[in-house]
Amino acid sequence: MISKLLIANRGEIACRIMQTAREMGVATVAVYSDADAKALHTRSADEAVHIGPSPAAESYLVGEKIIAAAKETGAEAIHPGYGFLSENADFAQAVIDAGLIWVGPKPESIRAMGLKDAAKERMIAAGVPVTPGYLGADQSVERLSKEADAIGYPVLIKAVAGGGGKGMRKVDAAENFAADLESCQREAKASFGNDEVLLEKWITSPRHVEVQVFGDSHGNVVHLFERDCSLQRRHQKVIEEAPAPGMDEATREEICAAAVRAAKAVDYEGAGTIEFIADASEGLRADRIFFMEMNTRLQVEHPVTEEITGVDLVEWQLRVASGEPIPLKQEELSINGHAIEARLYAEDPAKGFLPSIGRIDHFITTAPFEDYWTFRYDFGYDYEDTVTPHYDPMIGKVIAMGGDRNEAISQLLTALERAEIYPLKTNLPFLIRAADHEDFRAAKLDTAFIERHLTALTEFSTPLREMAISVADDIAFEIQQLSQLDKPADSLLRNTIGWRLNSKKRNRVIVEDDRGNTYDIDLDNDIQSEVAYRGAGPYPAQVLHRGELVQFKHHEPRGTGAASAADGAIIAPMPGKVIAVDVTEGQTVKAGDRLMVLEAMKMEHALTAPFDGTVTELDASEGGQVQVEAVLCVVEPIE
């Protein structure tokens, strides 16, 4: 058995692996960048080695530094987690060549399934059904456009390398194909170093169903049943569950058998996932489920499989990497109960899911002791940790278990509603609304679920709006009292003045919150209630309701010269890198035209013209780094 393990990753997956390693008596080594010097995974390991600057390309993606750290600390094995180098066959080979144990599949298996076009060809040969599409070597725009026309719109453009929703675009019409192809290729090149793509027919009622497989060096391959990962946004999974709702035993048997054939076709060892797309227009049927790709690593959503099978997949990984056979035979594996996982991100659903960065000043997730067995928190951050712009903004995962799906949903909602995290914005309210939605409860699932219900999942809720109005009233009352005081430092607002006056007379006040909402308060007539919730921290008041947080903060009065989107100023919503600039000074643009693209936290964010106008200022260039709220360009309306 491995005695010392280096985890070549960060965040919640590094913490998750360390947990099992400790239980097995295996010593752990963390690696960390400048940004992660005080991170939870760095603090949790028995040893930690610094491997470079904050950008992943200079630290977590530099295989030589990771191998050197393993040798320096005497680690026998390297576990790659997921993301970063986990599916890099060259890195896996380098680990083996260095005399270390690679906790993962053989490099040749990674290569065989690493490129989606070659993998689909191999699956066809193995008798695994695949989605109709184009896998050709001709990557010209002309050929790809022609093939898309032949497949019929809508089509899906998909990078042949990588995963995690990167390098994927749904195209609804031929006139959009060239622009979407360019964006997809650019994102794929940046994420995976390979801009080749394949095309697939877009399934109109798609369910994302995947099967967990596991192989060993003794020729054994088993499956651990299926998961449903249909709730997605921009091809990124949000809520996952096991088993898949509506899966009958005959269909389960067939899809799981196909997954085992797929794994055996590449002589697979370790944990892997065979991903399928199902046409669920008539429910889940074996003849309408198609192979998409194989992930040759542990998946983010692996906990739901662990909870329904009672298997610790990380323990299996370490045992198989040590040369042991799979601990259980297929007939010894069974489904018990239901499990659901929700991914918690530092992002603001009310503002287009823009990432939120900064320190976590308030962090509560602990469930009461009597309920501990129904909840599981796999987190990579804790109180006073900082979310930086350098990596994926996932804070962690909340997993709930139950005897059946309804019980699991109820437990998940309880776990989410008990969580309190601020001042960072998170997707907690979004997750609560999604899990509590009548269609989700009724298992009316497909990959367009979030897009279809987006307004209901992200809008400013009525209870929260009412509470915010109450807080605004109370702040206005404080302002009225301030006018009578000689010592404003004695006021509630002594730390941060979260208000502004719109006239010299103090009979009307405009209070603003951090969502950009304004509350025009008549001091003579509108003051009517007290603060609904007041929390600690630098904010004079804040409201928290079912994970949804509104904070009142200072805004400069109009006329100070501060730029705003309403003035035509295009402002950076977060720190990031400008990866494309589509306009020049003096250029005429129309409302909705793309002006530039900002990359932050591994995602692209297109900035568009707010109205018809002329670009009068341009303060951004391709490749440049920008700070949050920097004015990147100005569009003046056409008179």
Image: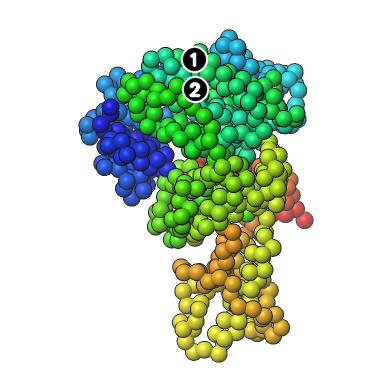
Amino acid of disc 2 = Glu
Rendered view: 150 above or below 584: above
What is the quadrant of residue 137 in the picture? top right
208 vs 436, nearest the viewer:
436
Residue lying at 61% horizontally and 42% vertically, measured from the top left: 405
In-image side of 639 versus 486 (left or right): right
Residue lying at 57% horizontally and 18% vertically, measured from the top left: 257
Question: Of the residues under marks 1 and 2, which one precedes in the sequence?
Answer: 1
Foreground label between 1 and 2: 2
Instruction: Name the image quarter holding the C terminus.
Output: bottom right
For residue 396, the mark is: none
Q: Residue under circle 2? A: 331
Amino acid of disc 1 = Lys
Residue that sits furthest to the top in the current view: 125
Residue lying at 62% horizontally and 39% vertically, measured from the top left: 232
In-image side of 545 versus 70 (left or right): right
Q: Residue under circle 1? A: 264
Residue 382: image location, x then y, percent: 40, 53
Residue 536: image location, x then y, percent: 46, 69
Quick check: can you spot residue 312? yes
Quick check: can you spot residue 451? no
Q: Residues within 10 Å of mark 1 (few under 14, many from 20)?
A: some
